[in-house]
Image (spheres, helix red, strand yellow):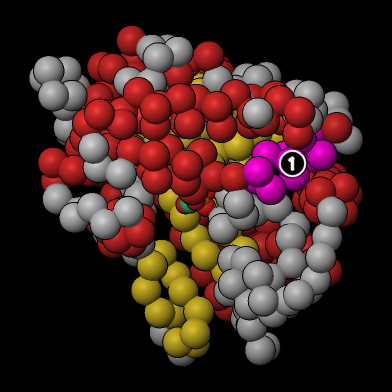
């Protein structure tokens, strides 16, 4: 075992993050990503607009009923409501665990320019300590794996897995639950079978490196993709097919002592992401909890309804809470299209 300071505490935070009926809101869009989202609703990405948008989400009445944790961005973790209350406080008061994105985005991999590696290990330790002081309890690092012509390379999978392991160990030493995110991208014309194969290679390498580094698996959460076809594949699959492939893969590669796995939505529509999660949990129970950590699939309708206008805040919150409730049901395998309306 490693010198993780307080493993029992990390384990209990991890368990609460994936408690039955609850999941995570990913509201950690970087400046570039949130700008892309705001362009769609013709709202300029100013600091004040970003603050107002996140305030709308975090102050949704009863958010803690369905949401166990929120991933914040560096700017957001220091922001306050219009009335001057730190977002961190707002979340704590609502019974929601604050987390933080700690990677610094991706860059081209040396020697393989069509693949990405993640930036942010330099100075990470100091940043983790600052986030702990601010009140964060968990930290996310995203690595992306690209499927393409002769991609991914073994070298790319290995480097991403190693970097994830270094970050995860630093988190546990600092007292933060690592939310380890290897994402096999949906972009491309690859089949669902290819996604399954690459996801298997990726997750196997990630757990190998995590264990080699001495990361305590009971004190972490995995955040990964479902097994789905590439967006340009033309392959039509049912939620049951996604579920069967994803569960088959997880049974092969997820360690039993992992408390839980919270899916990213990765470009799935809101309803698709809920239907797939529900179909997956209908195959349970499993030894690990399978929950959600959605960005777009929790926010798309709310963002559109908000449109940058104060008078739309209550309606936008209802859209967000509705998606949160639908996904909460899906963590229990109790969702059906009939509860959508
Ligand atoms: P999406 O659910 O929009 O993929 O975002 C989740 C996330 O946090 C990606 O890092």
Q: Determine whether 263 is above or below 109 in the image.
A: above
Q: Nearer the viewer, residue 118 or 210?
A: 118
User: Is 280 a magenta residue?
Assistant: yes
Residue marked by disc 1 = 275
The answer to whether residue 313 is above or below residue 125 is above
Q: Is residue 89 left or right of residue 294?
A: left
Mark 1, Cα crowd under 10 Å, few <14 / some 14-19 / many 20+, is many
- Residue 80, image x and y in percent? 16, 26
Image spot of residue 294 (x, y percent): 53, 42
Drawn side of residue 137 relative to residue 131, left or right: right
Q: Residue at x 17, y 32 (%)?
A: 79
Residue 324 visible in the current orientation: yes
Q: Residue at x 17, y 33 (%)?
A: 78
Using the image as rendered, state which of residue 124 and residue 316 is in the foreground: 316
Q: Quadrant of residue 81?
A: top left
Is 72 or 16 nearer to us in this picture? 72
Q: Quadrant of the N terminus?
A: top right
- Residue 248 in sight here: no
* Span shown in magenta: 271-281
Image side of residue 82 versus residue 35, left or right: left
The majority secondary structure of the magenta stretch comes to helix
**Is-magenta flag for residue 275?**
yes
Q: Quadrant of residue 228?
A: bottom right
């Amino acid at each position: 075992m490693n010198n993780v300071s307080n493993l029992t505490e990390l384990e209990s935070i991890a368990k609460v993050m994936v408690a039955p009926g609850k999941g995570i809101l990913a509201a950690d869009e970087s400046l570039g990503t949130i700008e892309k989202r705001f362009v769609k609703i013709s709202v300029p990405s100013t600091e004040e607009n970003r603050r107002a948008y996140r305030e709308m989400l975090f102050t949704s009445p009863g958010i803690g009923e369905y949401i166990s944790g929120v991933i914040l961005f560096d700017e957001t973790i220091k922001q306050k409501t219009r009335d001057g209350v730190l977002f961190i406080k707002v979340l704590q008061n609502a019974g929601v665990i604050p987390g933080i994105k700690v990677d610094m985005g991706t860059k081209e991999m040396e020697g393989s320019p069509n693949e990405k590696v993640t930036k942010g290990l330099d100075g990470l330790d100091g940043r983790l300590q600052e986030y702990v002081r601010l009140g964060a309890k968990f930290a996310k690092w995203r690595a992306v794996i690209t499927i393409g012509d002769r991609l991914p390379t073994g070298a790319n999978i290995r480097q991403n897995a190693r970097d994830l392991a270094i970050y995860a160990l630093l988190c546990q030493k600092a007292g933060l639950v690592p939310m380890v995110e290897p994402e096999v991208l949906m972009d491309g014309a690859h089949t669902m079978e290819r996604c399954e194969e690459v996801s298997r290679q990726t997750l196997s390498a990630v757990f190998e490196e995590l264990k080699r580094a001495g990361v305590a698996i009971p004190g972490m959460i995995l955040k990964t993709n479902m097994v789905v076809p590439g967006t340009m594949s033309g392959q039509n699959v049912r939620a049951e097919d996604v579920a069967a492939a994803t569960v088959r893969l997880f049974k092969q590669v997820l360690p039993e002592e992992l408390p839980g796995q919270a899916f990213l939505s990765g470009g799935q529509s809101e309803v698709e992401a809920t239907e797939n999660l529900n179909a997956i949990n209908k195959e349970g129970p499993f030894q690990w909890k399978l929950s959600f950590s959605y960005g777009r699939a929790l926010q798309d309708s709310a963002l559109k309804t908000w449109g940058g206008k104060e008078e739309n805040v209550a309606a936008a919150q209802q859209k967000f809470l509705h998606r949160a409730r639908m996904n909460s049901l899906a963590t229990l395998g109790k969702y059906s299209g009939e509860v959508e309306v």
